[in-house]
Amino acid sequence: MTLRILDPHIHMTSRTTDDYEAMYAAGVRAVVEPAFWLGQPRTSVGSFTDYFDSLLGWERFRAAQFGIRHHATIALNPKEANDPRLREVLAEVPRYLLKDGVVAVGEVGYDSMTPEEDEVFAAQLQMAHDAELPVLVHTPHRDKLAGTRRTLDVVRESGLPPERVLVDHLNETNVELVRDAGAWAGFSIYPDTKMDEDRMVALLKEYGTERMIVNSAADWGRSDPLKTAKTGRAMLAAGFTDDDVDQVLWRNPVAFYGQSGNLVLDPVPGFTEGAPPTPGVEFEGSSVLRGARA
């Protein structure tokens, strides 16, 4: 089977061009890159706007050279929501939500479940409501079950329809909570932490393929941008059909992010597989490198 993959959560800013080539060869044709913590704490609003501009301009251009459509989600991430110097980032987020290639608000949610995170989370859920965009929610690495319950309570209070909410970094402890809430369930497949392919296959056998989304969440740490493809192959080996795999790796993330109206999934003009990377015609001198609309 030739896989068709939209990786719905991957941090390509942290990855190499070799990764792009390998991803294309594995079947990845589109990605969503959420705005996130870069490892080194940022200390000013300008560092965020430069980063957002890079996600919507340079990274989109870079992906296209390797035949992959790049999209982004924009937000002040939960970890940095605790720094009072960065609160002004919230004033910048709404104008970025209007730009080409933005398919959701995210990552939002909790890191340490502080009052500051509560405030920033609620504010950005309201932004998603106002912009009529889906939301990508980050569940905390610690106290994950309690964090998921609190997350779902805040989402309910926001009035956002659950079908516009993707709750990510789930595992066996909290998937049922998210499913019962009517939201989309996201799973990050990692070499050492979070989930692996076999555990993911077991969950798909138990809960089915509806509203289930698999991502690599590959970033600057030890991670693997081919984990989506590896999960697809593990599904096939476990008896899932080609259609099941296509639903989990392509149709589900397309359905979720497609609610934004901003997904672009047609082939990149000018891209030839195996040829030296050159920008497609539509990218030469275009607004893509300037961050597009508004």
Image (cartoon, rainbow, N blue to C red):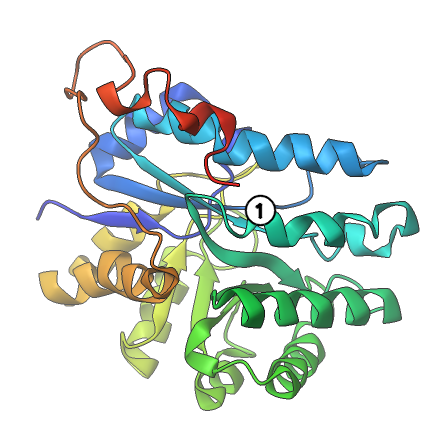
| Image position of 171 (left or right of 111) | left
Between 202 and 189, the residue placed more toward the observer is 189
**Residue occupying the point 46% across, 90% down:** 180
Give the residue furthest to the front. 294
| Image position of 168 (left or right of 43) | left
**Count of marks overlaid on the render:** 1
- Residue 232: % across, % down: 24, 54
Q: Which residue is mark 1?
A: 96
Q: Is residue 153 above or below residue 243?
A: below
Which element is circle 1 on? helix
**Residue occupying the point 46% across, 29% down:** 59
Asked if residue 238 can be seen in this view, the reply is: no
- Residue 160: % across, % down: 54, 80
Give the residue furthest to the bottom. 180
Between 67 and 141, the residue placed more toward the observer is 67
- Residue 26: % across, % down: 23, 37
Give the residue furthest to the right. 84
Residue 27: quadrant of the picture: top left
| Image position of 252 (left or right of 11) | left
Asked if residue 80 can be seen in this view, the reply is: yes
Between 250 and 97, the residue placed more toward the observer is 97
- Residue 35: % across, % down: 59, 45
**Residue occupying the point 43% across, 56% down:** 196
**How packed is label 1: few (under 14 Cα within 10 Å), some, or many (20 or more)?**
many
Q: Amino acid at mark 1?
A: Tyr
Residue 152: quadrant of the picture: bottom right
Give the residue furthest to the top. 276
Q: Is residue 180 above or below residue 107?
A: below
**Residue occupying the point 18% across, 59% down:** 246
